[in-house]
Amino acid sequence: MRWRTAAVVAAAAVGAGAVVLVIGRRASERMVHPGAGPGAGPGAGPGVGVAVQESGPILVQSLAAGRVTFTRRPESLRRGRWAVEWEGGGHAVVEEILHSDEQGVTRRLVRADRGTLTPGTEVHFTPRVLLGDPSEALGLAFSDTSADGELGALPAWHLDGKRGTWVILVHGTEADRQQTLPVLPVLDRLGLPVLAVTYRGDAGAPASPDGLSHFGATEWRDVESAIRLALDHGAGRVILYGWSLGATMVLHAAARSAWANTISGLILDSPVLDLPASARRDAARAGFTGVAAELGALAAEGRTGVDLADFARLAEGADLHAPTLVLHSPSDRIAPFGAAQRLAAARPDVVNLQAFPGADHAALWNSAPDHYTELLRRWLTPLL
């Protein structure tokens, strides 16, 4: 493949032997160990999960009733609904921009639910607007359950509903089940039972045997375990809904599961469809560019044993049989938008691509919460 050839040529340019191996291994760390590497942490955006990175310190300049003014940075200028977090566990939610000039950016302050914001506080922006479980975050009743995975029990949140079709929510890497919280209210209003699931490597779930992420190639079997759980508890059909690499797991499950015939729809938010390109981009975001980024992408393939030909087949939609809603941003810095366009062009019979211009990877809801929610409602209603 072209990317493999480029990496081999790059390796020759840098040198051979141990030096090349060390460079490749270091550049691949964040890809194969989600959360590894500089800057890792909730909401910071390492790996191929939620890509929100800061361009410089963001300080609270001033506070007034229902508003807060920040240092002017690309992050503080993002449209939509965001959280800001600060040292000591502080967390607040901000929405639309009320005023902006060269001195600062004033946004509406929705709430400060943990800690106290004061002028001079250094904050970072994160898409984690909602924290906790469905009851704590939204007042929605739920129960803790677990799917019986091949490696052990996989904790899940179950929200009841009157429909026979269940929705299985699969978060991305560098996230957890809290990533699914924003879509729960619309699913609840539609009467859809929900399973927000975990998979190998998550907190509370079994570790991957080799400790590595496999970009969905093994993790999809944990999604299949969730499908079995739903069917065993009365689901007639299921809709699979994933973010980032969670969306990639969903594609794997839809193509390979023994229960694929029960899947009535797929929702893919910021899916990783071009693995080599995403691997190079992630290595570059970790500070490895050019030759080193190519080596990192190659090392990630070698360390995980992912089958790129098989991955490409999934990305082409060759195995898609159910209506599929793809939500993606042309500005995505991790998963190239062009791959989503190619999927939609290859399978116009089943794929509906909706673009979110200017949005970050796996933070589409944050950029336009009402629009995102209404798209879900309209697309899901005919499947009920």
Image: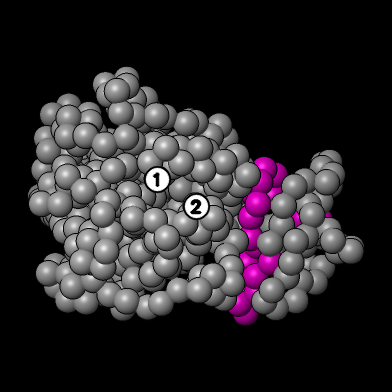
Residue shown at 34% from the left, 71% from the top: 156
| 56 sits to left or right of 289 | right
Q: What x and y, as percent, mark residue 185?
A: 55, 58
Q: Is residue 1 shown above or below 39?
A: above
- Which mark, by number, is residue 384? 1
- Give the residue type that dot 1 points to: Leu
Q: What x and y, as percent, mark residue 300?
A: 20, 50
Residue shown at 32% from the left, 61% from the top: 34
- Which mark, by number, is residue 190? 2
Which sits in the foreground, 89 or 94?
94
| 305 sits to left or right of 295 | left
Residues tagged 1 and 2 counted as in contact (Cβ below 8 A): yes
Q: Secondary structure at mark 1?
A: loop
Which sits in the foreground, 330 or 194?
194
- Give the residue type that dot 2 points to: Leu
| Residue 82 shown in magenta | yes
Q: Is residue 24 shown above or below 109?
A: above
Task: Measure the alpha-carbon separation of dots 1 and 2.
Answer: 8 Å
Q: Which residues are magenta?
A: 69-92
Q: Secondary structure at mark 2?
A: loop
Mark 1 Cα-neighbour bin, 10 Å: few <14, some 14–19, many ≥20? some
Residue shown at 81% from the left, 59% from the top: 68
Q: What x and y, as percent, mark residue 11?
A: 17, 39
